[in-house]
């Protein structure tokens, strides 16, 4: 089973730009879209085999001085991850440096169904993102 055409890229430097990601990932096949956020991105390929190749080859590599995570996107649209704007996101600041994305997901599940989580370090601070599929869960988490 293939992982889909959408790839998650985590641990990005604040210096990394969309064009940098397009240039790096274009060698694996046609890149349809890059959705760059702070510290992470989603890269959409036109063919799932190209996405598989990128995950296999790029995971753990250095990009702009940072060791990046590259994996198939998880979440609400099957293996392709959540549709853009489909979830309700919360940015979490001041996380303990030992906090993993799984820890954050477990914490977020206390109030509702989590679609996606990620954590990253920027300088000396650790941040996270929790994305809920339902507005009610999102609002409960904000309390």
Image: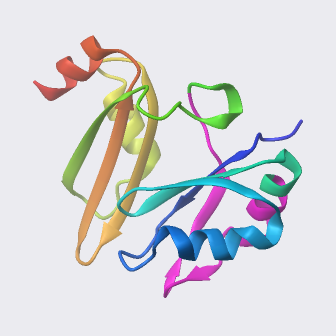
Percent position of residue 84, x then y: 47, 35
In the picture, measured across the screen, residue 52 lies left or right of residue 58, that is: right
Which image quarter: residue 34? bottom right
Which image quarter: residue 117? top left
In the picture, measured across the screen, residue 50 lies left or right of residue 24, that is: right
Percent position of residue 113, x then y: 41, 19
In front: 4, or 102? 4
Q: Quadrant of the N terminus?
A: top right
**In the image, is residue 31 above or below residue 105?**
below
Percent position of residue 141, x then y: 21, 25
Query: Residue 20 in magenta?
Result: no
**In the image, is residue 69 above or below residue 5?**
below
Task: Please tell me which residue is depicted at 38% across the width and 55% down the height of the picture.
Answer: 119
Q: Residue furthest bottom?
A: 65
Count of residue discs: 0
Res 94 visible: yes
In the picture, measured across the screen, residue 107 lies left or right of residue 25, that is: left
In the picture, measured across the screen, residue 42 lies left or right of residue 109, that is: right
Task: Please tell me which residue is depicted at 63% across the width and 68% down the height of the picture.
Answer: 22
**In the image, is residue 49 above or below residue 61?**
above
Query: Residue 61 in magenta?
Result: yes
Q: How is the image coloured?
A: rainbow
The span picked out in magenta is 52-75
In front: 96, or 83? 83
Res 60 visible: no
């Amino acid at each position: 089973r293939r992982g889909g055409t959408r790839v998650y890229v985590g641990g990005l430097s604040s210096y990394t730009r969309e064009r940098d990601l397009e240039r790096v990932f274009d060698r694996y096949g046609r890149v349809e879209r890059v959705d760059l956020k702070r510290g992470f991105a989603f890269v959409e390929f036109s063919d799932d085999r190209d996405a598989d190749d990128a995950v296999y080859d790029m995971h753990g590599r250095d990009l702009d001085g940072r060791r990046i995570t590259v994996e198939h996107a998880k979440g609400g649209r099957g293996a392709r991850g959540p549709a853009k704007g489909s979830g309700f996101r919360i940015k979490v600041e001041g996380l303990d440096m030992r906090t993993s994305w799984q820890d954050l997901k477990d914490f977020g599940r206390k109030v509702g169904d989590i679609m996606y989580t990620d954590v990253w370090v920027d300088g000396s601070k650790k941040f996270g993102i929790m994305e809920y599929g339902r507005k009610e869960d999102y609002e409960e988490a904000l309390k």
